[in-house]
């Protein structure tokens, strides 16, 4: 790090390059932070005596955000949805220092009522233009919009079938929510008019995942249990743009080599089994799909070609629920690099997206949870990872688990270890103050150098 600061001071490295290098370095050092936990069944931090009193209720609830399992999480503030139909909000600002153990408690929750979901949550997402609202879908066949401040439902849409996932475009003005349901057609819900009758027909079986393009506001991708991934342009009377074919590594090049006036492909499968995850890269150039054939495929969306990224035989994917890999934002990475976190049952794989290289294997730490009697105990035997969320602005990752836990993953570099050891061994008095002053001065220099652009006359 000191060499990079020197290069920045000499003007040989720009502020953006320095920031990318440091963030990328921290990403490579990411690991579990078992000391930060989420307890959805209390109102204050339990001291050590609460671990020793032998009360099963306290021990069982500690470390569980949702007693019946967490099905989905998303971040503006952290929002979690449980298999018990509960939805909770968590304040992450209180646990920013990964070196300090901390027990998080929900700051707000949706109260159980006739207007809330009646069955487990399947997917959560914040309204992209205003974090004061969020969307939730459920096994109870409904899509709901909630006000974050009051945690009350402001709109409910009954789609007459299980809603596995939903997607709202981060750039569009049309306010259409695409819903993947047990029905074979993609359902479109118009938040402006309240209509939910429009649908996109083409799949032969249930739709499990949908995703709007981050750069083309009318383009939508969907994955189905029939093994196909379809692309849609909702402006067209015949909405379908075609399907992706895993056997095609060339794509439809068209007149200009980029698909101009090319004929649509109507036949082909993206996976040999159900497709339960569809995710775009943040530049919209690539689409990532995952399926029950235990394959992850990357597609060049300029031509629809299979990019032939191979991730090996270690991929596991057997559950019917939507499984979405997490793609790290480009501003965190060095130019040309793309990293994917894949929730592989009880561990998280960190891959180079284009090469398929396994960069890191993050194992879920063994947080002791007391056994719970009855059906909940049977459901929580395995700590399957159900959802991943990235905290914008920081190199922090959060994972949701079927055992009811939410776990934190943060970087811990060699510099961090040295700082921790230094603080643990530091002497009393003036020497301690001098060391603190030197660290503060170095931090200030780093902040100044990354914010200002140096030029030489």
Image: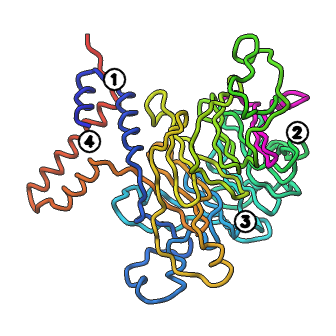
Q: Position of residue 229 (x, y in %)?
A: 76, 39
- First in sequence: mark 3 or mark 2? 3
Q: Residues within 10 Å of mark 2 (few under 14, many from 20)?
A: some
Question: What residue occupies the far front of the structure in this picture?
Answer: 313
Q: Secondary structure at mark 4?
A: helix
Whether 323 is drawn above or below 140: the answer is above
Is 148 positioned to the left or the right of 243 in the image? left
Residue beneath label 2, please?
Answer: 202
- First in sequence: mark 3 or mark 1? 3
Residue beneath label 3, please?
Answer: 120
Alpha-carbon distance for marks 3 and 1? 50 Å
Q: Which residues are magenta?
A: 215-240
Q: Residue at x 20, y 41 (%)?
A: 441
Residue 192 occupies quadrant: top right
Q: Residues within 10 Å of mark 1 (few under 14, many from 20)?
A: some
Is 97 positioned to the left or the right of 389 in the image? left
Residue 33 occupies quadrant: bottom left
Q: Residue at x 73, y 42 (%)?
A: 271
Residue 264 or residue 168, whichever sits in front:
264
Q: Position of residue 2 (x, y in %)?
A: 22, 36
Residue beneath label 1, please?
Answer: 453
Q: Tell me if residue 151 is in the magenta stretch.
A: no
Residue 251 or residue 20, whichever sits in front:
251
Q: Quadrant of the C terminus?
A: top left
- First in sequence: mark 3 or mark 4? 3
Question: In this rendering, which labeled residue sits more in front, label 3 or label 1?
Answer: 3
Residue beneath label 4, please?
Answer: 443
Alpha-carbon distance for marks 3 and 2? 28 Å
Q: Residue at x 16, y 45 (%)?
A: 438
């Amino acid at each position: 790090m000191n060499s990079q600061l020197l290069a920045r001071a000499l003007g040989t490295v720009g502020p953006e390059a320095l920031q990318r290098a440091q963030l990328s370095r921290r990403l490579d050092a990411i690991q579990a932070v078992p000391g930060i936990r989420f307890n959805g069944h209390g109102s204050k931090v339990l001291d050590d005596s609460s671990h020793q009193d032998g009360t099963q209720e306290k021990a069982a609830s500690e470390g569980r955000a949702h007693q019946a399992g967490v099905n989905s999480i998303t971040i503006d503030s952290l929002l979690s949805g449980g298999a018990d139909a509960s939805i909770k909000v968590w304040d992450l600002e209180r646990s920013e220092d990964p070196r300090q153990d901390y027990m998080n408690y929900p700051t707000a929750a949706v109260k159980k009522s006739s207007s809330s979901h009646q069955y487990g949550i399947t997917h959560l997402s914040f309204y992209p233009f205003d974090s004061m609202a969020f969307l939730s879908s459920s096994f109870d066949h409904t899509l709901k919009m909630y006000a974050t401040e009051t945690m009350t439902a402001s709109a409910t849409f009954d789609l007459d079938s299980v809603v596995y996932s939903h997607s709202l475009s981060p750039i569009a003005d049309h306010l259409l929510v695409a819903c993947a349901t047990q029905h074979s057609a993609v359902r479109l819900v118009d938040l402006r008019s309240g209509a939910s009758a429009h649908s996109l027909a083409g799949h032969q079986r249930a739709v499990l995942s949908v995703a709007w393009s981050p750069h083309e506001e009318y383009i939508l991708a969907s994955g189905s249990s029939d093994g196909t991934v379809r692309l849609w342009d909702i402006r067209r009377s015949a909405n379908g743009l075609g399907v992706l074919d895993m056997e095609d590594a060339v794509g439809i090049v068209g007149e200009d080599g980029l698909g101009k006036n090319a004929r649509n492909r109507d036949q082909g499968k993206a996976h040999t089994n159900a497709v339960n995850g569809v995710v775009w890269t943040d530049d919209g150039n690539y689409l990532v799909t995952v399926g029950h054939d235990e394959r992850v495929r990357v597609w060049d969306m300029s031509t629809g070609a299979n990019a032939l990224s191979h991730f090996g035989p270690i991929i596991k994917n057997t559950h019917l629920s939507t499984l979405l890999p997490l793609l790290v934002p480009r501003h965190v990475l060095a130019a040309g690099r793309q990293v994917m976190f894949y929730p592989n049952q009880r561990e998280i794989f960190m891959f180079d997206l284009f090469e398929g290289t396994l960069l890191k294997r993050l194992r879920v730490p063994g947080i002791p949870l007391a056994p719970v009697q009855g059906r909940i105990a049977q459901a929580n035997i395995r700590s399957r990872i159900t959802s991943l969320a990235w905290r914008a602005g920081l190199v922090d990752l959060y994972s949701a688990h079927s055992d009811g836990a939410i776990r934190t993953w943060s970087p811990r570099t060699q510099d961090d270890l040295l700082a921790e050891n230094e603080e643990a061994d530091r002497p009393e008095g003036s020497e301690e103050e001098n060391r603190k002053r030197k660290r503060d001065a170095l931090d200030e220099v780093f902040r100044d150098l990354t914010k200002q652009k140096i030029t030489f006359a």
